[in-house]
Amino acid sequence: MKSPRIVTIDGPAGSGKTTVARMLARRLRWRWLESGSLYRAFTWLVLFLEPELLKAEPSSVANFLKKHLPHFRFEVSEQGLFLSFQGRPLREELRLPEVEARVSDVAAMAEVRSLVNEILRRLAREGPVVAEGRDMGTVVFPEASAKFYLTASAEVRAKRRLRDWQARGLSLSWEEVLASLQARDQKDSSRKTAPLSIPEGAYVIDTSLKTPEEVLEEILSRLP
């Protein structure tokens, strides 16, 4: 099997794209590049250093992030994108409910997306990647020779996300998670800049009734 240098996997929250992208990267022995961590890290930084910026012009947010960019460190491997800020590893910070609630607002800012895309493309030049996110196949890497779009029902996605949050000790109801996901879906699909959509030429997989292993094998069978 001759694999392309970039495989993109897009889809809404809870569709299983993160799990499958991780598995695919390990199988191919490629690096796993996911945009979500970047948007979450930038959202976390704004929330906990300058939360009032969320009410400011997008250009102000982008300038704030550019000013602090030298303090970030990015490392990409089969395990994903590792981020640290001023030497502080960012892990649980990226999954805080406060970050989850506002990441779509930050991701909707054209100037911020431009900054993130620039970083992603630079990191991808270092070698083959499985690129996972919401606009990897439409905007960031439209030239990718293999594109996939994962989806699932909102109810199934809410159950998955609730399970993830409970594993981290967060106490939320299924109804709260479902409402959060539906609000996220609305924001992602209606934003003016790079709305969530199926990339041209992408192979669509509904993961609602499939295991991650089944989805992985389906993707592998579709690679050039």
Image (spheres, rainbow, N blue to C red):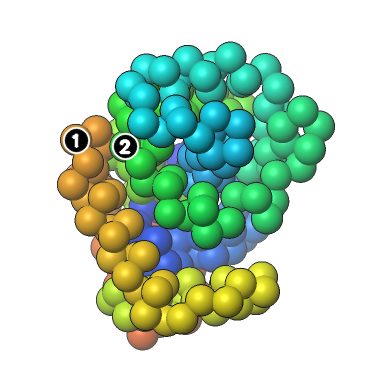
Marker disc for residue 192: 1
Q: 10 Å neighbourhood of mark 2: few (<14), some, or many (≥20)?
A: some
Q: How far apart are the alpha carbons under marks 1 and 2?
A: 7 Å
Task: Give the residue type that dot 2 points to.
Answer: Ala
Residue sitting at x 37%, y 46%? 104
Whether residue 200 can be seen here: yes
* Badge 1 amino acid: Lys
**Residue 51, image x and y in percent?**
50, 35
In this rendering, does residue 201 appear at all?
A: no
* Residue located farthest toward the front when viewing the structure as drawn: 52
59 and 220: which one is in front? 59
Residue 75 tag number: none
**Where's residue 109, x and y in %?**
33, 30
Q: Which mark is residue 108?
A: 2
> Residue 126: image x %, image y %?
62, 27
Q: Disc 1 on helix, strand or loop? A: loop
Q: Are marks 1 and 2 in contact (CB under 8 Å)?
A: yes
In this rendering, position of residue 31 left or right of residue 16? right
Whether 30 is drawn above or below 59: the answer is below
Q: How many marks?
A: 2
Which residue ends up furthest to the right in the rendered image? Answer: 87
